[in-house]
Amino acid sequence: MIVKMFDLARDHKEIKDKILHIAEKVLTDGEFILGKEVRAFEEFFARYIGVKHAVGVGSGTDAIKIAGLAFGLKKGDKVVTTPNTYIATAMSLSLHGVIPVLCDIEAKTYNMDVGRLDEILKKEKGIKLCIPVHLYGHPCHVDEILEACRNHGVGVLEDACQAHGSLYKGKKVGGFGDASAFSFYPTKNLGCYGDAGILLTDSDLIYENALMLRNHGQSARHVHTIEGYNTRLDEIQAAILSYKLEQLDAWNAKRQIIAGWYRKGLAGVPVVLPEEESWAYHVYHLFVIRAKERDALMKRLADKGVTTLIHYPTPIHLQEAYRFLGYKRGSFPKAEAAAEEIISLPMYPSLSEEEVGYVCDTIRTFYA
Ligand SMILES: Cc1ncc(COP(=O)(O)O)c(C=O)c1O
């Protein structure tokens, strides 16, 4: 049996007719940039998460960049985030001279350790913004992060790029901080057919700044009030995302069911399964287990036709690009230990119980 890590072609097959119809309608209408589809999706997504404003942009990376700059970050300002995230969490802003300060994670959820965050905020001067990542689809310790940041006059930008629909104490993540960023990269829980992203905020000021920053700094046609970028959500992608957003809750529920199949199939096997806090609704963007024999297990799975991935094999502070930050191996023991042992198993809504059973049996046989 072949079980892919993601299967976008299969996911697409289920909604193909509808998607082609939507694309055809936008093509026929002939409006492609910042038109009614983008506005409709922005309103829909803002309402879905429960915030006032949304600004559709070209990627999740740009959503973080534009949100940070719209918040007022300047060269030399610092942001605090975790080392075990996708590189874009740090790189979106570090390329603009913003300095990432890293905070280790807790082993249980792989998210920001709030005790460590508090210590860093007490010690390190110049931090303007905290970027907690709701990694793999499990929410961070939102209340504690908000309180620590409030106490130190630091803003919060949620990196919710892996957490569309995830709930913290019953409320959607992405609606807690000064702003939040989502990616619609094709494999995400809400993915489009290319690159796209969105930033959300309740702040009128961040919203107004973000509108200009995504469109050449323009405040009115041919009036360029500030310097800005061209990073706009496309009309076709927006129209497709509006349709897919209607399915998101059902797809997330299916991911929960698949996670349940994995838990049942891997019960008693000596791997560490993902934890769900009692206050969390985990949307399983990724189903990440931990195994001491990670590399051999991945090879066995590959030999048996199962693709797996590592999210992420090298923490940010050990990447060549971030050598200048001055961290070293040992700086973040929990993130480093996780990077040695984690494996992401196949996870997408169209995965069947038989396929999950096959993955679990392969792992069980490996340990037998
Ligand atoms: C946690 C996290 N942050 C940021 C990004 C960047 O999003 P994009 O790939 O849409 O630029 C991603 C997506 O890959 C992500 O997973």
Image: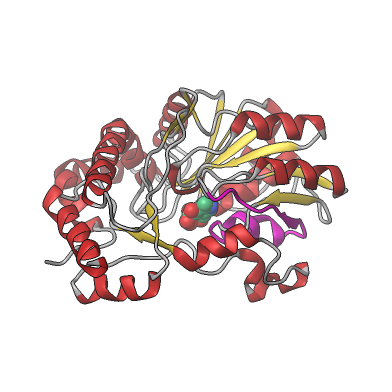
Q: Position of residue 283 (x, y in %)?
A: 38, 39
Please tell me which residue is depicted at 19% across the width and 63% down the height of the picture. Answer: 3
Where is residue 303 shown, x and y percent of the image? 22, 77
Looking at the image, residue 187 lies above or below residue 202: below
Along the line of sight, the residue nearer the viewer: 179 or 297: 297
Is 326 part of what is drawn in magenta?
no
Please tell me whether residue 101 belongs to the stretch shown in magenta: yes
Q: Quadrant of the N terminus?
A: bottom left
Q: Image check: 108 left or right of 79?
A: left
Task: Examine the rendered structure and indicate whether residue 85 appears above or below residue 36.
Answer: below
- Total numbered labels placed on residues in the image: 0
Q: Residue at the location (45% across, 61% down)?
A: 311
**Residue 279: percent from the left, percent from the top?**
47, 27
Residue at left 37%, top 50%? 273
Q: Nearer the viewer, residue 12 or 238?
A: 12
Q: Nearer the viewer, residue 181 or 328?
A: 328
Judge left or right: residue 316 versus residue 125.
Answer: left
How was this image coloured?
secondary structure
Residue 354 appears left or right of 136: left
Percent x, y for residue 276? 42, 38
Which of the image's four quarters has the C terminus?
bottom left
User: Image quadrant of residue 213?
Assistant: top right
Q: Residue visible at 28% across and 34% down? A: 253
The reply to whether residue 223 is in sight is: no
Please state the extent of the stretch shown in magenta in the rendering.
85-107
The reply to whether residue 126 is visible in this rendering is yes
Quarter where residue 327 is shown = bottom right
